[in-house]
Amino acid sequence: MPEFDAYQDLVGKWRWRLRGGDGRTVATSGESFETHWHALRAAEAVRGTAAAALVNSEPAGRVEDPLAELVAREARDGRRALEVSAAWN
C-alpha cells in the first residue's frame, strides 16, 4: 500500500517522500524542513490537496516538445545544445 514517510537528507534536514506499493519512491518534497514533524505535516497537506487535484493535459509552459524547443533556441543563439550538454558530462 502506498505511504508517505519522512527522512533526513545529506545535510540533516527532513524531507517527505511517497512510496508506491512496491516500495519505490514515487514523489519527494521539493523543499527541506527543520523537523521530522514539519516534513510529515507537509506530506499530509500534499495528500489532502492531491486527492482533489485534476490532471492537466496541457504541456507545462505550453511547450509541446521541450528538447526541440531547446535545440531551436540554441540554434538561434549560435550554439549547439548537444555540445553544451556534453561539456557538463
Image (tube, helix red, strand yellow):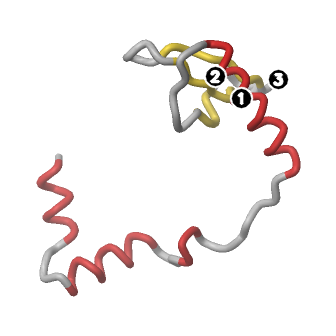
Q: Amino acid at mark 3?
A: Met
- Quarter-wise, where is residue 5 in the image? top right
SS class of the residue under badge 3?
A: loop
Name the front one of labels 1 and 3.
1
Q: Amino acid at mark 2?
A: Ala
Tell me the number on the disc at residue 75. Answer: none
Question: SS for tag 1?
Answer: helix
Instruction: Report the disc number at residue 43.
Output: 1
Would you say 88 lies left or right of 70 here?
Answer: left
Q: Is residue 65 found left or right of 42 in the rendered image?
A: left
| 66 shown above or below 29 | below
Q: Position of residue 40 (x, y in %)?
A: 70, 20
Residue receiving disc 3: 1
Q: CA distance from mark 3 to mark 2?
A: 20 Å
Please tell me which residue lies in front, 38 or 60: 38
x, y percent for residue 15: 56, 23
- Across and down, in percent, residue 67 comes to 38, 70
